[in-house]
């Protein structure tokens, strides 16, 4: 289990796999916006460990990604898909949960019990090349603060990653 700790829809970053300068810049950004809740050193260790664990996913027979429809999760999903594709890791499956019967309002996966999460498992689907290409496009739009691309993505009536347009609209 890898829990990602970064607000990828905000702040300067590069699209895709980061170089060392980008990791250092991201560390500084997170240090500034979190008010020093964690030291720069701890943030740097966390970011480096996250990317290392992501690269280590190549050793697994299958990688299952669990996300809900919120902006935080969708920005993370497109970034992780872009990074995994960069590393040639393509044994990917996705479970996306945007609602759950009987839970109103649905805010995210954290509301679900173990049994409810298990019920979602049968809905996993392999990630397609079309979804990977779309993820790269969206990750680049987030990273570059491309408002024109954000508007275009938000207006899409359907998308290879179906929760991205609404998430992008929320970002706008």
Image (cartoon, rainbow, N blue to C red):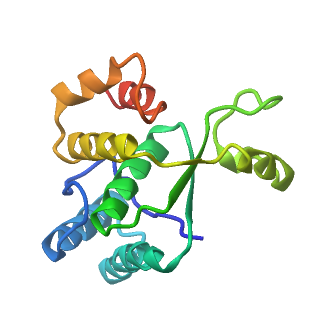
**Measured from the top left, where is residue 53 in percent x and y?**
44, 77
Q: Quadrant of residue 123?
A: top right
Q: Residue at x 47, y 49 (%)?
A: 127
Q: Is residue 55 left or right of residue 123?
A: left
- Nearer-the-camera pick, 59 or 108: 59
**Measured from the top left, where is residue 3 in percent x and y?**
54, 65
Q: Quadrant of the N terminus?
A: bottom right
- Nearer-the-camera pick, 57 or 47: 57
Q: Quadrant of the C terminus?
A: top left
Total count of labels: 0
Q: Residue at x 30, y 67 (%)?
A: 31
**Measured from the top left, where is residue 67 in percent x and y?**
56, 48
- Nearer-the-camera pick, 170 or 36: 170
Q: Is residue 82 left or right of residue 141?
A: right
Q: Residue at x 42, y 21 (%)?
A: 158
Q: Is residue 34 left or right of residue 59?
A: left
Note whether 10 is above or below 5 in the view shown: above
Q: Residue at x 72, y 50 (%)?
A: 121
Note whether 130 is above or below 102 in the view shown: below
Q: Quadrant of residue 134?
A: top left
Q: Is residue 46 left or right of residue 141?
A: right
Note whether 19 is above or below 117 in the view shown: below
């Amino acid at each position: 289990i890898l829990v990602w700790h970064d607000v990828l829809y905000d702040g300067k970053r590069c699209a895709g796999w980061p170089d060392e300068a980008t990791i250092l810049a991201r560390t500084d950004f997170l240090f500034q916006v979190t008010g020093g809740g964690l030291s720069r050193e701890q943030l740097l260790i966390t970011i480096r460990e996250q990317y290392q664990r992501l690269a280590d996913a190549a050793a697994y027979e299958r990688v299952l990604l669990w996300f809900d429809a919120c902006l935080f999760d969708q920005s993370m999903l497109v970034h992780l898909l872009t990074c995994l594709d960069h590393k040639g890791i393509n044994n990917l499956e996705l479970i996306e949960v945007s609602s759950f019967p009987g839970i109103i309002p649905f805010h995210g996966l954290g509301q679900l019990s173990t049994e409810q999460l298990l019920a979602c498992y049968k809905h996993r689907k392999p990630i397609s090349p079309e979804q990977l290409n779309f993820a790269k496009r969206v990750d680049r739009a987030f990273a570059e603060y491309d408002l024109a691309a954000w508007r275009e993505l938000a207006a899409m009536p359907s998308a290879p990653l179906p929760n991205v347009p609404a998430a992008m609209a929320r970002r706008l």
